[in-house]
Amino acid sequence: MRNIAMTALLLAACVMAADVSGKWSGSFTSGGQGPQPMYLILKQDGNQLSGSGGPSVSEQHPLQNGSVQGDRLTFELPGQGNVYLRFENDRL
């Protein structure tokens, strides 16, 4: 499992919106690796967050444990049997 920080632009856009539903693209970095593409399709229903994410539109994996609490988004994005993205933004 790796901790991954997505770009500040994507985070700011998600958090500032009243409803984060929609298609989002950006990148993330992990360890010493350079930026990797990320494409998210999010659906917000109240405090519940669902959808999918992956490196492209054609490679998507379902989100798990997604929630929206005020200005905080959390979700996990499993890949190949392991959670490869656990996202929790800090208040911006």
Image (spheres, rainbow, N blue to C red):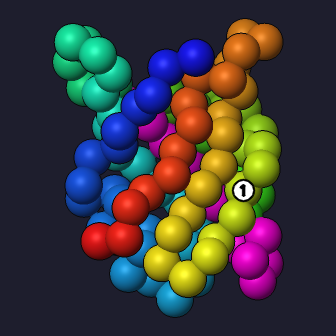
**Where residue 30 appears, x then y in whole percent?**
33, 21
Local secondary structure at mark 1? strand
Q: Main secondary structure of the magenta part?
A: strand
Which is nearer the eye, 55 or 70? 70
Furthest residue toward front: 90
Q: Is residue 57 visible?
A: no
Q: Is residue 6 above or below residue 20?
A: above
Quarter-of-image position of residue 78: top right
Q: Residues within 10 Å of mark 1 (few under 14, many from 20)?
A: many
Quarter occupied by the C terminus:
bottom left
> In the rendered structure, does residue 44 fall within the stretch colored magenta?
yes
The image shows a total of numbered marks equal to 1
Q: Is residue 18 above or below residue 90?
A: below
Q: Is residue 38 above or below residue 81?
A: below
> In the rendered structure, does residue 45 fall within the stretch colored magenta?
yes
Question: What amino acid type should be assigned to the residue bearing mark 1?
Answer: Gly
Q: Which residues are magenta?
A: 37-48
Q: Please report the residue visible at 29 percent of the width from the left and 27 percent of the height from the top.
A: 29
User: Horizontally, is 72 left or right of 6 in the view?
Assistant: right
Q: Is residue 47 visible?
A: yes
Quarter-of-image position of residue 21: bottom right
Q: Which residue is mark 1?
A: 66
Q: Is residue 30 above or below residue 17?
A: above
**Where residue 15 appears, x then y in whole percent?**
42, 74
**Where residue 90 appears, x then y in whole percent?**
38, 61
Q: Please report the residue visible at 35 percent of the width from the left and 39 percent of the height from the top.
A: 5
Which is nearer the eye, 5 or 79? 5
Furthest residue toward bottom: 18
**Where residue 24 appears, x then y in whole percent?**
46, 56
Q: Please report the residue visible at 43 percent of the width from the left and 57 percent of the height from the top.
A: 89
User: Horizontally, is 49 left or right of 68 in the view?
Assistant: right
